[in-house]
Image (tube, helix red, strand yellow):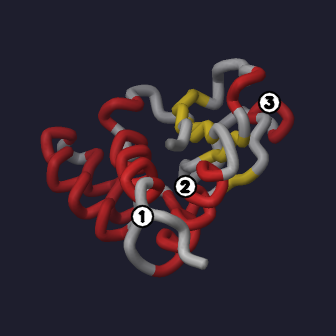
Amino acid sequence: MVTITVRRVYDDPRPDDGTRVLVDRLWPRGVSKERAAVEEWLKEVAPSGELRTWYHKDASRYGEFDARYRQELEQGPAAEALDRLLALARGGPLTLVTSVKHVEGSHLPTLVDVLEKAAQTPPSP
């Protein structure tokens, strides 16, 4: 079982956060590296710019956004970044850090779901 938490970059870090990883494509405006308190920035695991722009034009397309984002996570740099997140999650508590205002309508629920399902499969030797 893995422990994955989502927190906004504007909130203070907590002692139980474990490894904090920024999972946004763009660095949060006005936030210093010290303030963000992240160990890594895996921007490749965020939705592509094209997908993000398409979704923001009509938030009612969340279902299709979710499906397209899952496809993006299966290939290229996104898949490599996802593997890195999975390894971190298997190593202890993982906090996904984001600047989005409405986490529930963002890429984070999908990312957490994909990570939790992948964590149920034993790691490759």
**Residue drawn at the location 42% of the way across and 42% of the way down:** 108
**Residue drawn at the location 57% of the way across and 28% of the way down:** 8
The residue to which callout 3 is attached is 35
Q: Residues within 10 Å of mark 1 (few under 14, many from 20)?
A: some
Q: What amino acid is labelled 1 in the image?
A: Ser
Q: How many marks?
A: 3
Residue 105 horizontal side relative to residue 78, left or right: left
SS state under label 2: loop
Whole-percent x, y for residue 13 in the image: 73, 24
Whole-percent x, y for residue 125 in the image: 60, 78
Q: Residues within 10 Å of mark 3 (few under 14, many from 20)?
A: few
Q: Are marks 1 and 2 in contact (CB under 8 Å)?
A: yes
Q: Is residue 70 above or below residue 26?
A: below
Q: What amino acid is labelled 3 in the image?
A: Arg
Q: What amino acid is labelled 2 in the image?
A: Arg
Residue 122 horizontal side relative to residue 19, left or right: left
The residue to which callout 2 is attached is 25
Residue 3 horizontal side relative to residue 15, left or right: left
**Residue drawn at the location 65% of the way across and 38% of the way down:** 93
Q: Residues within 10 Å of mark 2 (few under 14, many from 20)?
A: some
The residue to which callout 1 is attached is 48
How far apart are the alpha carbons under marks 2 and 3?
18 Å
First along the sequence among labels 1 and 2: 2
First along the sequence among labels 2 and 3: 2
SS state under label 1: loop
Furthest-right residue in view? 34
Q: Are marks 1 and 3 in contact (CB under 8 Å)?
A: no
First along the sequence among labels 1 and 3: 3
SS state under label 3: helix
**Residue drawn at the location 45% of the way across and 27% of the way down:** 101
Q: Is residue 90 above or below residue 108?
A: below
